[in-house]
């Protein structure tokens, strides 16, 4: 699979559906993936680091997963916080269909898998979790973060996982320089070659 497919809106590759078994929030789940999506055969190592290090989210609230893929982060949030509304956004319509299917398989009704433009403009988020799509290019990545991080509620936090060798430290500096009036950014932890960056919304 060419690397650009997973951030295409409509992947041209053959679907080739498959099932994988993963553990999320202490539950073993059989989930749907397919060709033309990010990490179709397993939970991506960066995502696994984020899931393993994230603090337990509140039971309720409005949460966001940016670049949701087939759904490991969004599903985990929905399982851990059954009274929350979890918005999961991606430009790849194939993964949105997969996530909707996976939410049904997990018995979840609190996941909204949508295109970015379909998120209501007035929503303010109580938390953002993301394995952001680094390979879309620097400008596109900056545009994504500039769009979503300011939509955190005051004092609410975003957690981003970024590989050290893919520019985690330079991304942290860019957020500090360009979004400094909006969020405070710091390195929360480092594990297995990945940085977890925590952005806190300022008043």
Image (cartoon, rainbow, N blue to C red):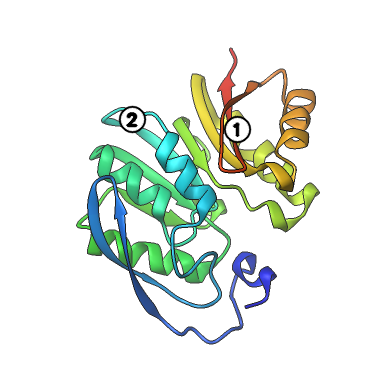
Q: Residue furthest front?
A: 192
38 and 102: which one is in front?
38
- For residue 73, the mark is none
> What is the spatial separation of the Cα atoms under label 1 and label 2, in whole angstroms?
20 Å
The image quadrant where one finds the N terminus is bottom right
* Residue at 49% from the left image edge and 54% from the top image edge: 68
For label 2, count other residues whose C-alpha is less than 10 Å away and answer few (under 14), some (14-19) or many (20+): few
- For residue 56, the mark is 2
Rendered position, 56 above or below 19: above
Q: Residue furthest left?
A: 107
* Residue at 74% from the left image edge and 36% from the top image edge: 171
* Residue at 34% from the left image edge and 30% from the top image edge: 57
Element carrying mark 2: loop
Residue 75, position in %: x, y?
34, 51
- Report which residue position mark 1 lands on: 149
Rendered position, 141 above or below 158: below
Residue 176, position in %: x, y?
74, 24
* Residue at 49% from the left image edge and 59% from the top image edge: 69
Element carrying mark 1: helix
Marks 1 & 2, CB-CB < 8 Å contact: no
Residue 146, position in %: x, y?
69, 37
In terms of image quadrants, where is residue 32? bottom left
């Amino acid at each position: 699979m060419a690397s650009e497919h997973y951030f295409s809106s409509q992947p041209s590759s053959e679907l080739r559906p498959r099932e994988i078994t993963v553990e999320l929030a202490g539950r073993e789940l059989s989930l749907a993936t397919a060709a033309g999506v990010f990490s179709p055969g397993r939970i991506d190592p960066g995502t696994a680091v984020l899931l393993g290090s994230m603090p337990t989210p509140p039971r309720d609230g409005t949460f966001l997963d940016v670049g949701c893929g087939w759904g490991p982060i969004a599903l985990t949030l929905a399982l851990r916080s059954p009274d929350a509304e979890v918005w999961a956004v991606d430009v790849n319509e194939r993964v949105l269909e997969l996530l909707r299917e996976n939410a049904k398989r997990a018995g979840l009704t609190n996941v909204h898998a949508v295109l970015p433009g379909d998120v209501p403009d007035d929503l303010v988020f109580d938390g953002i979790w993301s394995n952001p799509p680094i390979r879309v290019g620097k400008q596109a990545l900056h545009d994504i973060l500039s769009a979503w991080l300011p939509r955190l509620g005051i004092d609410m936090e975003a957690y981003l996982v970024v590989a050290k060798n893919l520019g985690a430290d330079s991304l942290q500096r860019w957020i500090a320089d360009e979004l400094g009036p909006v969020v405070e950014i710091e390195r929360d932890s480092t594990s297995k070659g990945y940085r977890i960056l925590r952005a806190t919304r300022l008043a």
